[in-house]
């Protein structure tokens, strides 16, 4: 039976708060990657330590995603906080962890490349395109549901009637949001050590996570997803992976 009164209000406030912090964490990433990570390291010769710390930070964030999205924690959360708040709890934790990752990411010395002239405009344009691609692709998945707002307000969700999207960006690669992410993090006009480690670690995580995600998709959609995987060969980067 659907809860009413103060319980419903609290549930909705938790959902709205999750949506706000979700958007805030993405905005903080953009600010961090675009401007904060320009800060030079305080110790120019210290390379191993910051890379190790950064790797640990992102691993904690990645483990949370893997455990809570696909594992025994998911039904446990449903039993503990109710199914309508399951997504909101995930969003709260994931968003806070992402903010911590961006905030505590240590500077790494060195510069892989630094573009000048027209190349700066070209690469910045690719980054903007990548960000826009991510947003437009996410809209096809229903951003309100991804943020947990529909569940918190008791609205119908796609999860109840799952549908496999194979058109638009999904006809290009099977994980188009990840493709947009690669454009966003790898086409920085100035790729210093700090950004390079972030781009490399996050890309490695996505590459490792995709087979596990697709295993769940095969369970959900069966031969429909298997046929789709045959038609759309590339996972997230055409010609490479």
Image (cartoon, grey):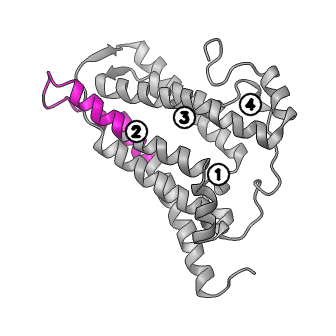
The residue beneath circle 4 is 170
Q: Nearer the viewer, residue 43 or 211?
A: 211
Q: Residue at x 77, y 40 (%)?
A: 219
Q: Is residue 54 left or right of residue 27?
A: left
Q: Is residue 208 above or below residue 91?
A: above
The residue beneath circle 2 is 58
Q: Earlier in the sequence, mark 2 or mark 3?
A: 2
C-beta proximity under 8 Å, tags 3 and 1? no
Counting from the top left corner in percent of width and height, residue 130 is at: 56, 29
Which corner quadrant of the image does residue 214 belong to?
top right
**How many marks can you see?**
4
Counting from the top left corner in percent of width and height, residue 94 is at: 48, 51
Q: Earlier in the sequence, mark 4 or mark 2?
A: 2
C-beta proximity under 8 Å, tags 2 and 3? no
Q: Earlier in the sequence, mark 3 or mark 1?
A: 3
Q: Residue at x 58, y 71 (%)?
A: 81
The residue beneath circle 3 is 131
Question: Quarter holding the C terminus?
Answer: top right
Counting from the top left corner in percent of width and height, residue 75 is at: 64, 60
The residue beneath circle 1 is 143
Which corner quadrant of the image does residue 4 belong to?
bottom right
Q: Residue at x 46, y 20 (%)?
A: 123
Q: Nearer the viewer, residue 112 or 205?
A: 205
Magenta region: 27-56
Distance between mark 4 and mark 1 Cα atoms:
16 Å
């Amino acid at each position: 039976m659907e809860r009413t009164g103060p319980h419903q209000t609290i549930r909705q406030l938790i959902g709205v708060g999750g949506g706000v912090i979700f958007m805030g964490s993405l905005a903080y990433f953009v600010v961090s990657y675009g401007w904060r990570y320009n800060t030079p390291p305080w110790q120019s010769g210290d390379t191993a330590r910051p890379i190790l710390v950064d790797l640990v930070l992102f691993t904690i964030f990645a483990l949370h995603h893997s455990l809570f999205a696909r594992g025994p924690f998911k039904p446990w959360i449903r039993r503990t906080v109710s199914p309508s708040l399951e997504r909101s709890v995930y969003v709260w934790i994931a968003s806070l962890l992402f903010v911590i990752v961006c905030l505590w990411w240590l500077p790494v010395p060195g510069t892989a490349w630094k573009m000048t002239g027209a190349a700066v405009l070209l690469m910045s344009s690719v980054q903007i395109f990548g960000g826009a691609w991510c947003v437009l692709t996410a809209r096809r998945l229903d951003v309100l549901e991804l943020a947990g707002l529909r569940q918190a307000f008791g609205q119908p969700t796609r999860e109840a009637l799952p549908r496999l999207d194979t058109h638009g960006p999904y006809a290009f690669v099977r994980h188009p949001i990840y493709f947009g992410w690669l454009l966003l993090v790898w086409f920085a006009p100035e790729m210093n050590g700090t950004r390079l480690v972030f781009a490399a670690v996050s890309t490695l995580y996505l590459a490792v996570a995709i087979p596990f995600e697709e295993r769940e998709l095969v369970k959900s959609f069966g031969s429909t997803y298997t046929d789709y995987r045959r038609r759309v060969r590339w996972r997230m980067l055409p010609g490479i992976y």
